[in-house]
Image (cartoon, grey):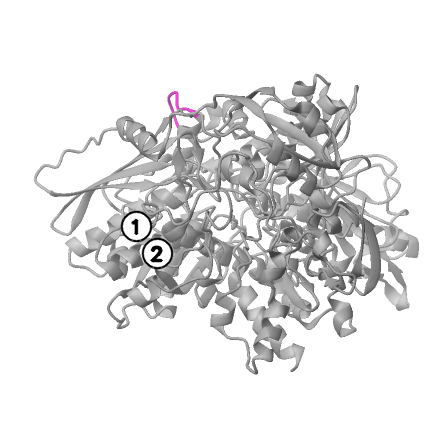
Amino acid sequence: MPTHTFKLNGKKISVEAEDNVRLLWVLRDLLGVTGPKYGCALEVCKSCTSHINGKAFNPCSVQVKDIEPTDEVTTIEGLPATVGKDLHPMQEAWLTYDVAQCGYCQPGQIMAAVAKVKQARKEGRDITDADLDELRNICRCGTYSRIREAVKAGAEDMGA
Amino acid sequence: MAERPRSLDRPTDQPSGGRGLLGRRRVLGYLIAAPTLAVGVSWLVNDTDPRAADAAVPSLPQPEDIFDLGDLQNLAAAPTSGLITVELKTDGTAFFAVPRAEVGQGITTAFAMMVAEELDLPMDKVEIGLADARPELLMNQLTGGSNSMRSMYLPVRTAAAIARQRLVDTAAAHWGVAAGKVTARAGVLTGPGGLTATYGSLAEAAASIKTIAVSAELKSPSEFSVLGRPRNRVDGHDIVTGRKQFAMDLQVPGAKPTMVARPPTINGTLKSINNLAALRAMPGISDVVGITHGVAIRGDTFGQCIDAIQKVDATWGPGTVDDESDATVLAKLRAAQLPMVVPPVLSQTIDAEFVFAFASNSPLEPDCAIADVRPDSAEIWSSLKVPIVAQEDIAKQLGLPIDAVKVHVIQGGGSFGRHLFHDVAAEAAEISQKMGKAVKLSWSRTDNFRQGRTHPMSTSRVRVNYLAGNVLSYEQRHTSVQTDFGHGLGEMITAFAADLPVGGNLSFAETIFELSQSSPYNFGVTTQLLNEVPLKFNTGSMRNIYSPNVVCAEELMVDRLAAKMGQDPVRFRRSFLKDKRLLAVLNKAAEVGNWGKAMPKGTAQGVGVHSEYRAAVATLVEIDCRPATVNRPVDGEGVTGPRVTKAVIVVDPGFCINPRGLEAQMIGGLQDAIALALTSSLHIKDGIPLEGSWDNYFYTREWNTPLDVEVVIMPNTSESPSGAGELAVAPAFAAVACAYARATGTMPTYFPINHGTLGFEPLPLQPSTPQSPTDGLDHTF
């Protein structure tokens, strides 16, 4: 079986898996990293949203062979370390606004939110309601109102 | 699940029950023989007295006015008297295993608040777990009907209050002082002269060597410092760090990923697998077996199970509704509608019929269960709202005694009615038994939509007779594809039939309908009746059973009546509402939402009121139906359409345990309502829903959600909490529908309003679970 090497949450790892296995299952079933959730495996619900090289992506729709040894994959578990803290400002905002209900979508929501804020910043602007309308992450509990409040607050605390 | 009391608690300043000098209520429980302090409380401390109907109303009380579904559940809870226990550990933490399911509604936080309050312990010293199936609790271990707060508020507080009293008495005895000289605060006991002891240090000394009955006093609400104040979720940190574990996240030895290839119609059966050897030889696949409704595949990863599903060559038998589509079901419903009885004589009549499409109650977490079935025992892990029924059914299915089946209740990633049933746990048990190995079974997303439970299609016909400013009669005939109540509520009704105020030989469904539905208006002769069509769909409730559809139809008719009588919708409701609490929330919503303000053409306000679970809610929304909004683009598959731009929800919850949690439930209910009114439904075609993903089933997305949502919680009007989980859906659904009618000038009669247009390309029916994409790296941001 092929061996795949990449950087996961700041550490270099190697894992044996068939080439076509989607990264979500490599993370969850083979490596025991269960923060990214299975909601559809169709790149629709976005509950597995994680980061590759700092950008949001859905590991349910990437074959493990397409991950390069130099790629840095960050799941919700590794998010705080990207800012050298116990919690990322977006996670803090999520707690402040008591966003979660069942919690199943929330790791993906937080990862998507961080990327969306960074995307706006790169374009030299603050995040807007129009940006938030573009987020596709499903929250079946319907916490959208608090998600929007938390993303805006988290964005302020993320700094420039 | 639904219940819909129209007879609300009246504001009380003289609560019932025996009271001490401080207005405290004295309650009973047991010190249980255990190594450390343990207190047990019977469900008998529940207030099970049916409440009197509001007096002096022209309409006769309907059954639900005097006894509602929650009262039924409370009645069922009373005599079985399995004890619930609060235990104190030597580290000073209190532990309570709640016999309910946490699925996002926030009950673990609310229970922790109750324990912290009465035990005078910091919240972070209270640990709440979910109890395994406890057969001795009989019907008490059912999470539904928004009943958890109502049924457990007194028992849980009682257990904590007795524990506190015991700790005070123990410290007093140790120190040789009167109990009145010992105070308890924040987990520490303090006596005269600087004496202190932590709860933990006394946990063993306070233990009882035999089980004895004791009493204690509950705090009066004026003494509360935890209950009634906003608290964030106790599991918030675990959630935002990805540590919260759902069934699929559990590591049970040997329980490998398992999925099922399924037939192309609902409840289809497997006749044969035609390429078994080839499937078993696929990479990563360890086991393939035929089961009742499919081909079960176990492997190293779920991805490889999905790969194998693509290759399954099977012969399928028919399902249970192969000849049914939306149109055939609607025709059957119309043929079964009960007749109206009030003839339109000497008055004016409005007749209308409303249709509500099938809807999916699937949460975001796909149905998942771990099963480890051995020759003489079995162990199950799953999110189950009625674990005792699951345990009983699975034991029977496996041919094992009930006590050989251990059922663990795992926190659920939502439920909305889905986890009242244990379909996935039963299937996991079947697979594990057939494979002789432990399995972690997940239904795929497509399975969840196409083979999972649905909220059934229904119609509501309404006839109103009115004359000279008076409404003479209101008749509503609700007709629904049969809703499955085979999860415990049915047993409850059978056991307590003689005690219920609904006579005759009503079915379970008719009984529940009568216990949950009644009109809040003085509309003269009022009848609301249910008839069901027994089609073999897999049905269930969905964040309430009947109320969202029944109330939506009713409130649309109220708006129409108001228009016919030349009255403003809010003023009309003020004239005809029976209940003061409903009137109060309506007035507050009108004030906060600035009812009647000038709105641009194509936009409008709408209002809906509803009482249920001993609570009252009014919702006021603004909707934008202008072409620029309706036709705004969205990337990929998805629907836009009219947008609710603002919502005000005013709730009178009786006693509010946790404003933060209550507000969350109101916001969530609103988003469900928007979906039901505007976007989300299942299209049944030739025996199966066409929907297969969240880009087909249009639950509210960010681009559909209002930017401006305000929840107002009214001052407490009672000492008893009401139910909250399902509360907001019905009035918000009605408000959105009414707003849409006013903005467009057309009363909608088919819900959701976009059901007539299929807004997606259906996924193929076979393979039953589509292959995952591979282009994820092309869509990063």
Q: Earlier in the sequence, mark 1 or mark 2?
A: 1
**Left or right placement of residue B207 versus residue B571 in this view:** right
Q: Is residue B56 visible?
A: no
Magenta region includes residue B505: yes
Q: Position of residue B709 (x, y in %)?
A: 45, 66
Q: Which residues are magenta?
A: B502-507
The amino acid on which the numbered mark 2 sits, given as a three-letter code, is: Ala
Q: Position of residue B600 (x, y in %)?
A: 26, 71
Residue behind mark 2: B735
Q: Are marks 1 and 2 on the same chain?
A: yes
The answer to which of B204 and B662 lies nearer the viewer is: B662
Q: Is residue B367 visible?
A: yes
**Image point 57% across, 33% down: which residue?**
B421
**Left or right placement of residue B398 versus residue A30 in this view:** left
Residue behind mark 1: B555
Q: Element under label 2? A: helix
The amino acid on which the numbered mark 1 sits, given as a three-letter code, is: Glu
Magenta region includes residue B645: no
Q: In which image quadrant can residue B547 be found?
A: top left
B139, above or below B578, in the image? above
**Chain at tag 1:** B
